[in-house]
Image (cartoon, grey):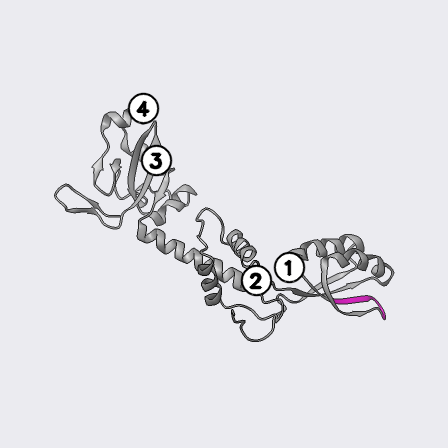
Amino acid sequence: FSVFSRDGVSLFSQAGMLRILYHNLKFEVACYKNKVVGWRSCVEKDLDEVLQTHSVFVNVSKGQVAKKEDLISAFGIDDQTEICKQITKGEVQVSDKERQAQLGQMFRGIATTVADKCVNPDTKRPYTVILIERAMKDIHYAVEPNKSTKQQALEVIKQFKENMKIGRAHRRLRFVLPVNEGKRLKEKLKPLIKVIESEDSSQQLEIVCLIDPGCFREIDELIKKETKGKGSLEVLNLKDVEEGDEKLE
């Protein structure tokens, strides 16, 4: 945002804006957006580092200052510095250009998360970020700014499964169980295991397997609890993938 006087002279360059609604009246202040978070978390204590001016506006971009009687009606005071402090609790406004840049950044962040977590379950090859972005555009996925990147990545994966071969990359584990508890524990762990790749019970029960990453914590806690710390769990591969990138056909 830029703030201009009536004669078109720029008063503040690249001003951020904070907006608050009080008693059905809208008030705004010109701020430095990168300082607002620090002020709210009490890291930044100098209000002058946050505000470009201590004036209260009804429209920052047009330079329209709020009337004294409106300030008193809404806040009960006309001390603009104190009112500015209250307005810093309001909503940070961004320009259309900034908003589009933020949405674009979030779109790529979602695609990156999906590409990092998933493979083609048939070939075990990962999908590239560019390919995931193209697929997101094909399903007309719209970014939701109020949801986290991780939440939206899981939603995208769910939608992709309707039309393409995609699934979470499995995690390869090795766990060692006391031989006297091994058979019983193996039965408890079976529902959480996707594939048992190898099994050795010559001394202790040693199993190498693939699991869904979402089951890792449950497996870890189960082994610790049931073996009273005598069992061990080791991550061999975070992702079971094949070399080369998957192509979307």
The residue beneath circle 4 is: 76
Say which of marks 2 and 4 sits in front: 2
Q: What element carries label 1?
A: helix
Q: What residue type is labelled 3?
A: Ile
Say which of marks 1 and 4 sits in front: 1
Real-space Cα separation, disc 3 to disc 2, in angstroms: 40 Å
Residue at (48%, 48%) from the top-left corner? Answer: 147
- Range of magenta residues: 202-208
Q: Which mark is residue 20?
A: 3
**Mark sitting earlier along the chain (1/3):** 3
**Mark sitting earlier along the chain (2/4):** 4
Q: Which mark is residue 213?
A: 1
**Mark sitting earlier along the chain (1/4):** 4
Quarter of the image for residue 65 reads top left
Say which of marks 3 and 2 sits in front: 2
The residue beneath circle 2 is: 117
Real-space Cα separation, disc 2 to disc 1, in angstroms: 9 Å
Q: Which residue lies furthest to the bottom in this view?
A: 243
Real-space Cα separation, disc 1 to disc 4, in angstroms: 56 Å
Residue 19 at x, y = what percent?
A: 33, 38
